[in-house]
Image (cartoon, grey):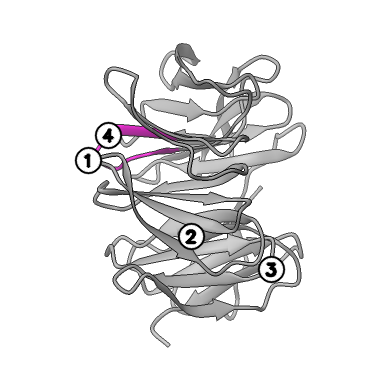
Amino acid sequence: LFMYGVGRNTESFKPSTYLKGQQLGVISIDIAGDGSFAVTSGLDCVIRGWDVQNGQPLWTIDSGPLEVWKVALTADAKMVVSGSQSGAVNLYSVDEREKVGSISTEDSFVMSVATSADGKYIASGSKNGAVYLFDAASQTMVAKSDAHKMPVRALCFSADSKLLFSGSDDGLINVFDTASGTIASTLSGHKSWVLSLSASMEGGWAMSGSSDKTVKLWDLRSKQAVQTMEEHKEQVWGVAFSPDGHSAASVSDDCSLLVYDLDN
């Protein structure tokens, strides 16, 4: 794995840290809010913690066969939340290095997970298109949507935790109001699967990557895509805003990582 330091000048854009030690393919990565460490999940069914400064492994959690897929850290960085091929949302303690909880769903494959910045919610998306919203403290379901009829591969919360975004193979992005658990709006424009999502810290923007090889920037006020980036040659598996909202990045199967200046 490579980690990059992104500044305003990206002419000499090179990896700043290499994370070495993953045995098989990497499924997902998340970084603690304070930047102190990162976690990854892999095809070897192991969750790994990493020192992002020197790239050294900190710890491992062996989840067991089929019990880990995409991962997300809770807001306090004390828990790792993971989807699984068994249909459960699993919770692992960072300090104890073991599974400490499991939330059952009615589905066979939890393909995506997300945690809210206020620490109140956990969300999951399933292969059959279901989206679940759970109360993080009680680990109970507070809402479920079957609006998507195809796999949900991407989820993210808004910075204020009031909205949940779900991206599906149906090409749609549903925007949920977390207080009511209902769909507030739907963003339409991708021609194929929605593979990745990110919401800006400022709150007015969202970004999506798709298997149609495009990245779209969405104005959440107008609920329209205000810009479509078509530089990638293959499907786009990851998108992210910078914390200051001035730039964003995307990564693709074409083996490129692109950085966008959102001020221009």
Q: Amino acid at mark 4?
A: Gly
- Mark 3 or 1, closer to the camera: 1
Q: Earlier in the sequence, mark 3 or mark 2?
A: 3
Q: Nearer the viewer, residue 203 or 51?
A: 203
Q: Going 52% across and 71% down the picture, which residue do you hit?
A: 216
Q: Amino acid at mark 3?
A: Lys
Label 4: which residue?
Answer: 119
Q: Is residue 69 left or right of residue 160?
A: right
Label 2: state its secondary structure: strand
Q: Nearer the viewer, residue 61 or 11?
A: 61
Magenta range is: 114-123
How busy is the neighbourhood of tag 4: few (under 14 within 10 Å), some, or many (20 plus)? some
Residue 241 horizontal/vertical position (percent): 43, 63
> Which of the labelled discs sits on residue 240, or is there none?
2
Q: CA distance from mark 2 to mark 1?
A: 25 Å
Q: Earlier in the sequence, mark 1 or mark 4?
A: 4
In the displayed structure, 97 sits above or below 115; it is: above
Q: CA distance from mark 4 to mark 3?
A: 33 Å
How busy is the neighbourhood of tag 1: few (under 14 within 10 Å), some, or many (20 plus)? few
Cβ–Cβ below 8 Å for labels 1 and 4? Answer: no
Label 3: state its secondary structure: loop
Cβ–Cβ below 8 Å for labels 4 and 3? Answer: no
Label 1: which residue?
Answer: 179
In the displayed structure, 47 sits above or below 250; it is: above
Q: CA distance from mark 3 to mark 1?
A: 33 Å
Q: Nearer the viewer, residue 217 or 52?
A: 217
Label 3: which residue?
Answer: 213
Label 4: state its secondary structure: loop
